[in-house]
Amino acid sequence: MPEKVLIYSRFPKALMVRIGERFELLDAAGKPPGEVFSAEQLSTVRAMITAGGTSLPGRVMDTLPSLQAIICYGTGYDGVDLKAARERHIAVGNSPGANAASVADLAVTLMLAATRRIIPADRFVRDGSWAASKPSPLLRALPGNPGRRIGIYGMGEIGRKIAFRMAAFETEIGYFSRTKYDLPYRYFESLEALSEWCNVLMIAVRASADTRHVVSADILKRLGTDGYVINIARGSVIDEAALAAALQNNVIAGAGLDVFEEEPHPPGALAALPNVVLTPHIGGHTTDSHTAMQDCVIANLEAFFAGRPLAFPVR
């Protein structure tokens, strides 16, 4: 008889098909488990699957008295109260690096779309302005990539893949991370110093209490009027009110955002601006990334139910 696994976050059913072939899935569809299933049904659940950004506090863990494993679908685990899990002897696993290539690709895509004004250019063609020879200040000539200084905040798997891709555009690469690595890129001792130096700030840092709103009005001002910020990490890293003000007042030139503080509801101020490109948290949303993430989830669950350490534990 297959082992029971609770699906805590809301996932498209198609993403759970492969996992459902191996385990009996109890899908809470993003609702509190106690509202969907009886206490008796939940009493025997030993493992759950969650999206890393979904809030999972200790009080929810307490509704599952047999819970011993929380498996995050994806790289992130910032929504999980790790302290509460540790106190309850619950193992936490994730899918490290499984979607890194896809997320890095989108970071580059957002940078190109923002710096080359792809969205206004598309609209300029579609609405007949090009055919009518109407002038457009948004389509004035802007600096290209050769010599552009790319600053990467966070040099994990995603940050490294961004750096590798951006180097092909004849750019200079710098980074700030808690650790200085043996890499062919310039290391900066602080985010402030990196922001002063770069033209494009790529945010690839893991979300935590320490990184909340760390990209502040001051950091944005340091980027300068020709600067851009690209975020494919977590929305909490940027002070969104400060970003909207910086974009409205030409403190920086533009932004490309795949993540927001309150998803799926980005601030209206950002959505109204022509110098920002928005996508709906699709960085890891490719078939190959989903296959890789599912492989990690399955490996973690199989190891857990076999009495072995998780294949990909969060440490």
Image (cartoon, grey):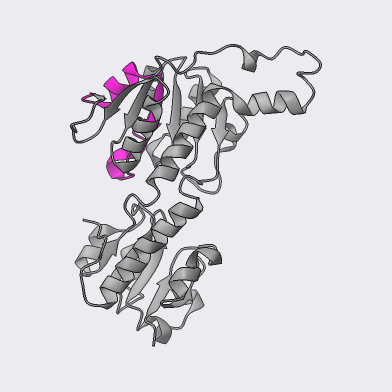
Query: Residue 154: horizontal and vertical position, in percent?
Result: 30, 36
Q: Please identify the quarter of the rendering in which residue 174 is found.
A: top left
Q: Is residue 112 magenta?
A: no
Q: Is residue 213 magenta?
A: yes
- What's drawn in magenta, residue-wise? 187-215
Query: Residue 206: horizontal and vertical position, in percent?
Result: 32, 43
Q: Residue at x 30, y 44 (%)?
A: 209
Q: Residue at x 36, y 55 (%)?
A: 79
Against 13, is 184 above or below? above
The total of numbered circles placed on residues is 0
Which is nearer the eye, 209 or 310? 310
Q: Residue at x 33, y 33 (%)?
A: 214
Residue 184 seen in the current view: yes
Q: Residue at x 57, y 25 (%)?
A: 275
Q: Please identify the quarter of the rendering in which residue 7 is found.
A: bottom left
Query: Residue 236: horizontal and vertical position, in percent?
Result: 40, 41
